[in-house]
Amino acid sequence: MKTKPRVFCLGLLIALAGNAVAALPAQVGGRPVASLAPIVESASPAVVNIRVRQTVSTRSPFADDAMRRFFGIPDGGGSRQVQSAGSGVIVNADEGYILTNHHVVENADEILITLLDGELLDAEVIGSDAETDIALLKVNAENLTEMPIGDSEELRVGDFVIAIGNPFGLGHTVTSGIVSALGRTGIGVGLEDFIQTDASINPGNSGGALVNMHGELVGINSAIISRSGGNVGIGFAVPTEIAGSVMNQILDYGEVRRGLLGVSISAIDAAAAAALNAPVDAGAIITEISPNSAAEKAGLKVEDIIIEINRKKISDARELRNAIGLLSAGDEVAIRYIRDGESRQATAELGERVTTNLAGGNIHRGLTGAEFQSTTASSVRGVEVSEVAEGSAAAQRGLRIGDVITSVNRQRVQSIGELIEVASEYQILFLSVRRGDRQLMLQIR
């Protein structure tokens, strides 16, 4: 089986939409370009095919114990082995480090790497980050070829790019396209700052390389928008600025230490800004500041409207969450905000976002298959759903990754401890859930 889509049908990765191919650049580095072959020949040995074997649970379609007993149906529990395919990029030949997608190797029992020359290698996961969909693998081998990491911040809309990966398990496949847009958000869940390309995205390309005309890695192919799972010419890659930061944090700390500003925020539109006499049409207004947080130390106050982070425009709460979440603890950020109708500047040193994960089955059997974390990083205070296993009881009851539970049976919850305390009193739970800009009510039995 191929890696599954990760957005709408999310997840696969990049090659070109044939009817959208633009003309080749006339020159690269002062030299005429008649073919992309030299770039491909240089970059391809650093791209690997990934095969993953994992164990998945099998369940009866009747997740509720009472229903199974009523119909005399056995539990149906058990497990089976499945295989999936993806791609990866060697970024350090001496150490054997490979970048790929988190969703390619998530819950893997065995990871097998195939090099361009057909050599097979076992790989292990050094670290993985679900929120950016980046994972770091390691293989033990000699004479590997690495791909130099380019500066994704230098990309411009219209730049030519090459995608190399393992679509449909066919092995190394190369396609080309252009950068269609930069800084894309709102694609799915997690932290987003995608490179958009018109390259085709197909199963098995996840984790492959997006390469610039200098043969440098500028993105890890990650996602598509598609209603059918096939290519519609809109694909996304995680910029190397983000992928490199995740890799370095994993190597330095063994984990990703995400930044925390320490504020609760809400989006603000032109009408709300006018009511506050603020000369803006969009932004994120601070509704609460945590004591001793980076925001408090920087002098920010409730009702300040944040409009820029590091010179990048902030239009709403999601953009602020992405901007801060993609930075590391200890990073300094330049903040532009509106107070009393005037534009002001502040500099903050980000704190560290601390999360505590808990399996849903330890809270209520209807939440089995989900994992939860208490965090103040969200613009909505509550308990965030960090994982949902496909086909699990939690998935069947409607929970999705990124949901934020704000109350249970009309009782507000802001931490895992409060969720456990309230949920333990009831057999039936009514969860008030914030999903993006929507408020939902889910019944959990």
Image (spheres, rainbow, N blue to C red):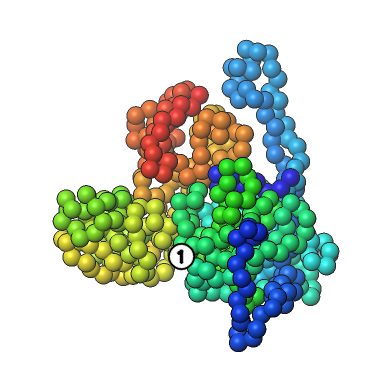
Q: Nearer the viewer, residue 355 or 306?
A: 306
State whether residue 97 is above or below residue 56: below
Judge from the rendering whether residue 300 lies leftward or rightward of residue 75; answer left or right.
left
Looking at the rendered structure, the secondary structure element under dot 1 is: loop
State whether residue 438 is above or below residue 72: below
Q: In the rendered structure, which amino acid carries the disc numbered 1?
A: Ser
Q: Residue 244's x, y, as percent?
A: 56, 68
Q: Nearer the viewer, residue 357 or 405?
A: 405
Q: Is residue 259 visible?
A: yes
Q: Residue furthest bottom?
A: 30
Q: Residue 40's x, y, as percent?
A: 71, 72
Judge from the rendering whether residue 296 lies leftward or rightward of residue 435; answer left or right.
left
Q: Nearer the viewer, residue 119 or 421?
A: 119
Number of residues whose C-alpha sits closer than 10 Å to that of mark 1, classed few (under 14), some (14–19) or many (20 or more): many
- Quarter of the view holding residue 136: bottom right
Name the residue at 54% across, 65% down. Answer: 179
The residue under label 1 is 328
Label count reads 1
Q: Nearer the viewer, residue 426 or 247?
A: 247
Name the residue at 37% across, 69% down. Answer: 310
Q: Residue 158's x, y, as percent?
A: 52, 69
- Quarter of the view holding residue 252: bottom right
Q: Residue 261's x, y, as percent?
A: 36, 60
**Which quadrant would the N terminus be assigned to in this image?**
top right
Name the residue at 71% across, 64% down. Answer: 174
Name the residue at 26% across, 70% down. Answer: 345
Q: Is residue 6 visible?
A: no
